């Protein structure tokens, strides 16, 4: 098991002071920091219930927290979707679970992806970083008897603390200092 205290101490003793000095924040509360991680997985509405439960239990092994089932709110015939049918799994990680998952992702799972060079730095307008994992088999806790490839989406949500008009560079630097595998910005 990886040392959880290491990533926590790296963030609060190394990364945040560097960001405070470089971007001249007046308080540590203004510095962009990880607030939560949202993990979402959507699937076809016609999957068997036992397969959905199997996927749910495998994802719970990965993150260490329960997923909740999201059901469709209304019927849409074009998508062959009926009301109250399970269409997604979702969980939100905060605190210890968040730091544990991010450490496991950075140091165990992502290095197991073949020919992986890093993620593109594409964020939304608020500076949140979203990416997808195509196969959850990169996590050592996951085992499917048949070669089923199941993927999910991960959103790293940062706190803003009233700073909505700042550039995205502090978020990029935070991820870079965390040793998160991102492709470097190419300035033209």
Image (cartoon, grey):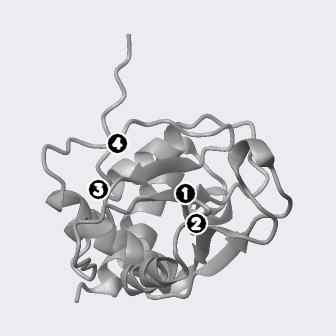
Other residues around mark 1 within 10 Å, as few (<14) / some (14–19) / many (≥20): some
Earlier-in-chain disc, 1 versus 4 = 4
Observer-nearest of 64 and 74: 74
The location of residue 101, given as percent across then percent down, is: 40, 75
Earlier-in-chain disc, 2 versus 1 = 2
In the rendered image, which residue does mark 3 sit on? 179
What secondary structure is found at the residue carrying circle 4? Answer: loop
The location of residue 123, given as percent across then percent down, is: 55, 39
Say which residue appears at 48% left-offset and 86% top-offset. Answer: 96
Question: Which residue, as the protein is rendered here, is positioned at the far right?
Answer: 74
The location of residue 100, given as percent across then percent down, is: 39, 80
Other residues around mark 4 within 10 Å, as few (<14) / some (14–19) / many (≥20): some
| Inter-mark Cα distance, 4 to 2 | 17 Å
| Inter-mark Cα distance, 2 to 1 | 5 Å
For this view, does 186 lie left or right of residue 65? left
In the rendered image, which residue does mark 4 sit on? 119
| Inter-mark Cα distance, 3 to 2 | 20 Å
Question: Which residue, as the protein is rendered here, is positioned at the far top?
Answer: 188
Q: How many marks?
A: 4
* Image disc number at residue 38: 2
């Amino acid at each position: 098991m990886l040392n959880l205290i290491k990533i926590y101490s790296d963030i609060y003793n190394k990364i945040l002071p560097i960001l405070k000095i470089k971007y001249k924040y007046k308080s540590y509360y203004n510095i962009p920091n990880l607030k939560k991680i949202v993990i979402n997985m959507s699937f076809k509405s016609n999957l068997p219930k036992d397969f959905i439960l199997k996927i749910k239990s495998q994802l719970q092994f990965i993150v260490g927290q329960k997923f909740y089932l999201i059901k469709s709110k209304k019927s849409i015939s074009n998508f062959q979707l009926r009301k109250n049918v399970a269409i997604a799994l979702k969980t939100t990680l905060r605190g210890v679970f968040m730091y544990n998952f991010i450490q496991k992702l950075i140091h165990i799972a992502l290095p197991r992806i073949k020919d992986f060079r890093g993620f593109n730095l594409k964020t939304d307008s608020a500076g949140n970083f979203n990416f997808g994992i195509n196969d959850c088999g990169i996590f050592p806790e996951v085992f499917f008897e048949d070669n089923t490839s199941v993927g999910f989406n991960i959103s790293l949500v940062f706190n803003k603390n009233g700073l909505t008009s700042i550039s995205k560079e502090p978020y990029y630097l935070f991820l870079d200092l965390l040793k998160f595998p991102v492709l470097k910005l190419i300035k033209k």
